[in-house]
């Protein structure tokens, strides 16, 4: 249906407000009281909306006005408070002039107009182009709507949230026509007492309700509704369902229950006529134990407990607030002061006054157990009946059952029942269901059939029980009587037909488990025999295999002695290989030689129990033969020793294996010694290779000076040290003058030798704390830590300059060289490494421009 959204005009406001104001003035002039209760204003639906001309011409306007009237409830409380203030009668009211009374009524009328104008300012309403007769706009109409008519009916309600517990997803809504339950699948930002607008669809249930997924908008603070006093019979008949009611009763039990999402306080209250359950928030502050045996008055929203078929099985009262429970009479005696009663005398204190009336139901008999129980089914609904009757009945007989309503079962039931034939029969066919369908409670006390696999069969004197696997769940099926079931082998596939008896669990008595009451042995039908691999056949096969295994074991014992030695050798070889792999992993990860040699010694002690293994690294520089001879002469208990050598002949250490007292040599000791020699030699060579690689990556290959990479790291570390200790730092930038001419005139080999001699002189001239690095072809950088005064840097620089005072003699040629020096100090010339290098570089180029190149002398 298309909708036109319009901003309400002044005419719409006046069309609603002025009739109310005019009515106030007229009634006042006639000296008649006026009431602004919501029930005194007729709903617009009743004003002849069935006439064709009205529906086609005026329906959009009146639909818009209907929404304005709906907003009236939220503003009426403010109008009432203002009206009471204006119309407050002084003591001399009777002697006041008539004009004063008229003026006060006129003031109230214009004040009403003001509140209506402010209340609707900025609001927009949907004005449908055509009225929808399918939309339900009152809670009372929705609540009484038959289930068959509630499917997919639109709902648009405006009223008050009478109860809302977001933890339990329980919400009740009430307006002036009645109350309904609102299904909520998520938490709404509303509270009890809020005025809300609900848009959604109807849902058939015990009484029609609002389906989940409704849109709820907060409009303001809602109206307070009167809670009439209700009796148990009224609640049991659903007269106060979903509405605020007031009840009186005595608290029989109390408990704080742990529900799925939160704690909930639960009271069992005995009313005149029956017992109800009361749920309220534990945070209301009541001392619940002190309420036991107290007479209370409780105001709350009437609800109930239902089975999966939406059949009422109990009464529940939802208390919205702390002030809704009032103690009328405290208990006569505290629990602690009650006298002790002997266990065998407890029954004499039982007293029950049951005023339940006998009811009559009719249905086809689907289950009958003489002197115990019966089940009737009619139109898909069933009822369990407790009876002492022993008459003969046939399954399928249509009977009338007379009894009293009971709340002891999951679904509606009768107690003290009597059965009378009506002379008809009806065949009730069982419904084939799955385990999930049966356990849901939708088929409680119905005649159903399920298929499953027999797990076990238990026989008793007067009953038999089958344990059947149905869809992966165990189900008990019980048949009573002297007629026995045929024997079923385990894993047989059977079909069971019987009454679905629900076992409720939890505080809300939700359906979770079920068992089947079978009526006769024929209710169990064999569908498929078990496979050949039954337990018996399996045992026979196992015995045959066991005999064969004894023969094979005897033969295996003969081979065991041959295999033990070989297996032991293989196992030891695997252990040695595993230890070798572990040590090789350490070697490949470039761990220090000490760590690798320590791991090797630990492995030797593990592989050869009773020995001690030790190593010496960087020991005496003797030959391998001399080291072994010396070791054996000094310690006769030494079993094995290996000298650790690098790439050359030099010995850098040794590993020694010595025997402890009681040592028994193992057969694989030579394999272990071989592994020791291999891994130890590899570890030393790998360590030396790693050191060489690290050195080559951080040092210049020609001069063996630190390269630019290492220089950058040392410079960064020097700046960290300066920041930590507050010391000084200087950089000296050195550039060899006219180095290109040396290469051009004498060749690159002469240039390399020239650079090596320069490096050697600079190394000899620098301090031990200074670092000299070659950062380019003919460029050097000196990092000078300043520990005392700033003159240290100049002194170092002057000492380095003296390196070029003497000529360089290279292969018979004399080169009189020179270099340009640039000095930069921290923090005078820069606060960072880059700034300091830049300053030293600029100083170096300044010096280069002020001097001439080297004098080249050919020898």
Image (tube, rainbow, N blue to C red):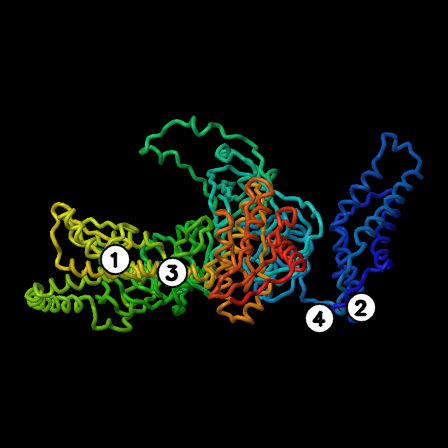
Q: Nearer the viewer, residue 858 or 365?
A: 858
- Pick whichever of labels 4 and 2 is earlier in the sequence: 4
Tag shown at residue 690 = 3
Q: Is residue 431 left or right of residue 606?
A: right
Q: Is residue 355 left or right of residue 180?
A: left
- Residue 709, given in percent of the width and then of the height, sits at 51, 59
- Pick whichever of labels 4 and 3 is earlier in the sequence: 4
- Residue 57, given in percent of the width and then of the height, sits at 82, 69
Tag 4 near tag 2, CB within 8 Å: no
Q: Is residue 276 visible?
A: no
105 over 776 or under it: above or below = above
Tag 2 near tag 3, CB within 8 Å: no
Q: CA distance from mark 1 to mark 4?
A: 64 Å
Tag shown at residue 54 = 2
Q: CA distance from mark 2 to mark 3?
A: 101 Å
Residue that numbered label 4 is attached to = 1
| Neighbourhood count class around disc 1 (C-alpha, 10 Å): few under 14, some 14–19, many 20 upward | some
Q: CA distance from mark 4 to mark 3?
A: 83 Å
- Pick whichever of labels 1 and 2 is earlier in the sequence: 2
- Residue 37, given in percent of the width and then of the height, sits at 75, 47
The quarter in which the N terminus is drawn is bottom right
Residue at point 30%, 51% (across, down) = 618
Q: Nearer the viewer, residue 607 or 656?
A: 656
| Neighbourhood count class around disc 4 (C-alpha, 10 Å): few under 14, some 14–19, many 20 upward | few
- Residue 331, given in percent of the width and then of the height, sits at 50, 30
Q: Quadrant of residue 843?
A: bottom right
The residue furthest front is 859
Tag 1 near tag 4, CB within 8 Å: no
Residue at point 59%, 38% (across, down) = 322
């Amino acid at each position: 249906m298309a909708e036109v959204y319009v901003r309400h005009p002044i005419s719409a406001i006046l069309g609603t407000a002025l009739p109310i104001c005019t009515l106030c003035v007229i009634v006042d002039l006639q000296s008649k009281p006026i009431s602004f209760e919501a029930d005194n204003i007729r709903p617009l639906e009743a004003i002849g909306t069935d006439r064709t001309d009205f529906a086609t011409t005026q329906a959009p306007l009146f639909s818009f006005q209907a929404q304005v009237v709906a907003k009236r409830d939220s503003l009426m409380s403010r109008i009432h408070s203002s009206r009471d203030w204006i119309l407050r009668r002084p003591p001399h009211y009777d002697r006041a002039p008539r004009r004063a009374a008229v003026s006060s009524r006129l003031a109230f009328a214009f004040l009403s107009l003001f509140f209506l104008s402010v209340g609707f300012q900025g609001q927009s309403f949907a004005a449908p182009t055509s009225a929808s007769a399918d939309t339900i706009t009152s809670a009372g109409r929705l609540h009484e709507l038959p289930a068959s008519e509630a499917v997919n009916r639109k709902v648009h309600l405006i009223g008050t949230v009478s109860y809302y517990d977001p933890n339990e997803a329980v919400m009740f809504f009430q307006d002036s026509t009645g109350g309904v339950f609102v299904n909520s699948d998520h938490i709404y930002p509303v509270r009890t007492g809020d005025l809300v607008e609900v848009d959604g669809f109807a849902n058939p249930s015990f009484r029609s309700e609002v389906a989940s997924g409704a849109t709820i908008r907060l409009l303001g603070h809602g109206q307070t509704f009167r809670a009439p006093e209700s009796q148990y019979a009224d609640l049991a008949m659903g007269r106060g369902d979903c509405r605020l009611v007031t009840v009186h009763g005595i608290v029989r039990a109390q408990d704080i229950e742990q529900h799925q999402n939160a704690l909930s306080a639960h009271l069992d209250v005995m009313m005149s006529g029956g017992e109800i359950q009361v749920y309220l928030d534990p945070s209301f502050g009541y001392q619940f134990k002190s309420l036991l045996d107290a007479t209370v008055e409780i105001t709350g929203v009437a609800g109930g407990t239902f089975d999966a078929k939406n059949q009422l099985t109990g009464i529940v009262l939802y208390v919205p607030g702390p002030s809704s429970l009032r103690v009328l009479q405290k208990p006569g005696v505290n629990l602690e002061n009650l006298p002790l009663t002997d266990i065998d005398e407890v029954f004499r204190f039982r007293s029950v006054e049951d005023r339940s009336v006998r009811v009559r139901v009719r249905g086809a008999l689907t289950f009958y157990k003489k002197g115990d129980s019966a089940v009737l089914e009619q139109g898909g609904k069933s009822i369990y009946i407790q009876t002492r009757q022993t008459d003969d009945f046939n399954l399928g007989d249509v009977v009338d059952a007379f009894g009293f309503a009971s709340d002891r079962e999951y679904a509606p039931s009768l107690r003290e029942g009597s059965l009378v034939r009506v002379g008809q029969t009806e065949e009730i066919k069982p419904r084939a269901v799955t385990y999930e369908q049966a356990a849901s409670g939708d088929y409680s006390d119905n005649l159903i059939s399920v298929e499953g696999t027999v797990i076990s069969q238990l026989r008793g004197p007067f009953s038999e029980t089958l344990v059947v696997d149905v869809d992966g769940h165990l189900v008990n099926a019980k048949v009573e009587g002297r007629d026995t079931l045929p024997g079923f082998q385990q894993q047989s596939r059977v079909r069971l037909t019987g009454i679905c008896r629900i076992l409720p669990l939890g505080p809300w008595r939700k359906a979770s488990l079920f068992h089947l009451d079978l009526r006769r042995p024929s209710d169990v039908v064999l569908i498929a025999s078990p496979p050949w691999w039954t337990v018996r056949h399996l045992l026979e096969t196992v015995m045959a295999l066991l005999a064969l295994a004894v023969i094979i074991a005897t033969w295996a014992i003969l081979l065991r002695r041959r295999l033990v030695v070989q297996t032991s050798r293989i196992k030891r070889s695997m252990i040695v290989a595993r230890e070798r792999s572990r040590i090789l992993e350490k070697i490949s990860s470039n761990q220090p030689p000490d760590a690798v040699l320590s791991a090797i010694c630990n492995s030797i002690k593990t592989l050869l129990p009773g020995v001690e293994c030790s190593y010496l690294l960087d020991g005496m520089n003797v030959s391998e033969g001399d080291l072994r001879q010396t070791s054996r002469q000094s310690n006769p208990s030494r079993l094995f020793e290996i000298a650790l050598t690098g790439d050359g002949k030099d010995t850098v250490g040794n590993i020694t294996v010595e025997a402890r007292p009681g040592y028994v040599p193992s057969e694989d000791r030579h394999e272990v010694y071989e592994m020791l020699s291999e891994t130890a030699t590899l570890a030393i060579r790998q360590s030396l290779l790693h050191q060489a690689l690290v050195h080559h990556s951080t040092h210049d290959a020609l001069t063996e000076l630190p390269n630019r990479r290492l220089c950058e790291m040392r410079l960064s570390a020097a700046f960290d040290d300066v920041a930590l200790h507050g010391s000084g730092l200087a950089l000296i930038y050195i550039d060899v003058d006219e180095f290109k001419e040396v290469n051009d005139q004498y060749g690159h080999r002469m240039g390399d030798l020239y650079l090596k001699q320069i490096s050697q002189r600079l190394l000899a001239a620098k301090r031990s704390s200074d670092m000299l690095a070659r950062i380019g072809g003919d460029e050097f950088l000196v990092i000078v830590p300043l520990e005392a005064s700033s003159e240290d840097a100049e002194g170092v620089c002057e000492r380095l300059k003296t390196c070029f005072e003497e000529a360089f003699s290279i292969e018979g040629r004399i080169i009189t060289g020179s270099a340009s020096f640039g000095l930069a100090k921290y923090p005078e010339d820069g606060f960072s490494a880059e700034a300091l290098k830049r300053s030293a570089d600029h100083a170096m180029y300044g010096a280069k421009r002020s001097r001439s190149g080297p004098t080249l002398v050919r020898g």
